[in-house]
């Protein structure tokens, strides 16, 4: 079985970590009562939004490629004489 889907999925992990840390820093700056007191939601920078979409795309691509590789590996294993 090939490992390319797994590697694509691993590439997306640092992007998820960057996204989570950056969002944590933004929420820390907003303060603990930012949403409770009716203040507007802090705007998310476009770069953070793009990182999130890229991480999601890479994660889904890695999972789909891994599933396809697994299906072809099972098919080859079943039909091997």
Image: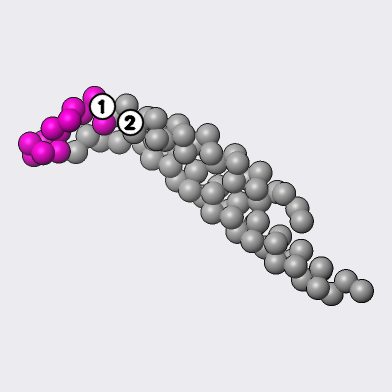
Residue drawn at the location 15% of the way across and 33% of the way down: 34
Q: How many marks?
A: 2
Residue 24, disc: 2
**Residue, x 76% and y 64% (percent of image)?**
73
> Which of the 4 image quarters holds residue 72?
bottom right
On the rendered image, what quadrant is the C terminus found in?
Answer: bottom right
Image coords of residue 5 (percent x, y): 66, 51
State which region is magenta.
Answer: 27-39
Q: Quadrant location of residue 64?
A: bottom right
Asked whether, in this view, residue 3 is left or right of residue 34, the answer is right
The N terminus lies in which quarter of the figure?
A: bottom right
Indicate the quadrant where residue 66 lies. Answer: bottom right
Between 70 and 58, the one lying in front of the other is: 70
Q: Helix, strand or loop at disc 1?
A: helix
Q: Residues within 10 Å of mark 1 (few under 14, many from 20)?
A: few
**Badge 2 element:** helix
Front position in the image: 29 or 54: 29
Does residue 72 lie above or below 55 as drawn? below
Give how far across and how far down residue 60 sits, in percent. Answer: 54, 54
Residues under numbered marks 1 and 2 in contact, where contact means CB atoms less than 8 Å apart: yes
Mark 2 surroundings within 10 Å by alpha-carbon count, few (fewer than 14), some (14 through 19), many (20 or more): few
Residue located 84% across and 75% down the image: 79
Residue 28, numbered circle: 1
């Amino acid at each position: 079985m090939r490992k390319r889907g797994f590697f694509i999925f691993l590439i997306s992990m640092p992007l998820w970590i960057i996204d989570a840390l950056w969002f944590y820093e933004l929420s820390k700056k907003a303060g603990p009562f930012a949403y409770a007191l009716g203040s507007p939601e802090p705007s998310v920078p476009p770069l953070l939004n793009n990182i999130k979409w890229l991480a999601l795309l890479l994660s889904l691509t890695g999972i789909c490629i891994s599933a396809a590789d697994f299906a072809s590996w099972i098919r080859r294993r079943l039909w091997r004489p």
